Amino acid sequence: MTVQSFTFNAFMTNCYVCHDGGEAVLIDPSCATASEQQHVVEYIDEHELTVRHLLLTHAHIDHIFGCAFFSARYGQRFQVHAAERAFIEQAEEQAQAFGVQIDPPPVPDTFLDEGDTVTFGGVTFDILHTPGHSPGSICFVDAASDQAITGDVLFQGSIGRVQGLPQTSRPQLMASITEKLLPLGDETTIYPGHGPSTTIGHERQHNPFLTSDEFRVTKDD
């Protein structure tokens, strides 16, 4: 699986096009401007990709700026966990709270949960429900290539924000990381919602939130 990342908008949020065998998925369209949207379209067109699925790790404002545009362009709605529906329905209120504007996304009609799969090309994404930063946060895992798109759950050297946002939980977030992501194995590359990619092994050893006495996790746990 090829993973192409883009970083857009004032929140520096990552958008991903994952593809294999001429088929693609678009994850977290953080494009806030027409120019940013065009960068993604040009990549898809240049590689002659057929977009099979539009996906969201969660529906905070910085991850959904481009939903309306890409839904219209590719004739489908973004798929997300059902617990995120309210955030999409309240997209304009989210935008006002952060002093930005958004073209309201269409409300999803397909929802994803733990145990579901998404396929494109020769890739099968396994869905993990990883709440904490957001109640419906999900991760997309390609076990065959040891790669995962993890949204705002685990970052290089940090974890998802739980202050100043609705429906967050630090204990839930840490449980999602330790029970869902760390078992993926040290070789797994993770592509987060912000910042550079990293690996489970690197974060297990160096992430201060995972090496603290309170949340220490070892390979043997």
Image (tube, rainbow, N blue to C red):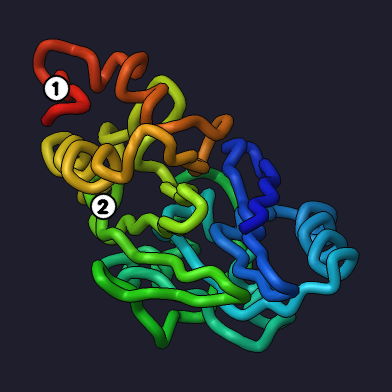
The answer to which quarter of the image holds residue 195 is top right
Residue drawn at point x = 84 percent, y = 65 percent:
47
Helix, strand or loop at label 2? It is loop
Residue picked out by circle 1 = 215
Instruction: Specify whether 164 is left or right of 32.
Output: left
Residue 101 image point, x, y percent: 61, 56
Type of the residue with mark 1: Phe
Instruction: Specify whether 201 is left or right of 18.
Output: left
Instruction: Specify whether 216 is left or right of 153.
Output: left
| In front of the other: 27 or 179 | 179
| In front of the other: 78 or 200 | 200
Up the image or down, 219 lies above or below 58; here it is above
Residue drawn at point x = 67 percent, y = 46 percent:
5
Residue 213 image point, x, y percent: 11, 11
Residue drawn at point x = 77 percent, y = 73 percent:
49
| In front of the other: 102 or 194 | 194
Residue picked out by circle 2 = 130
Up the image or down, 80 lies above or below 188; here it is below
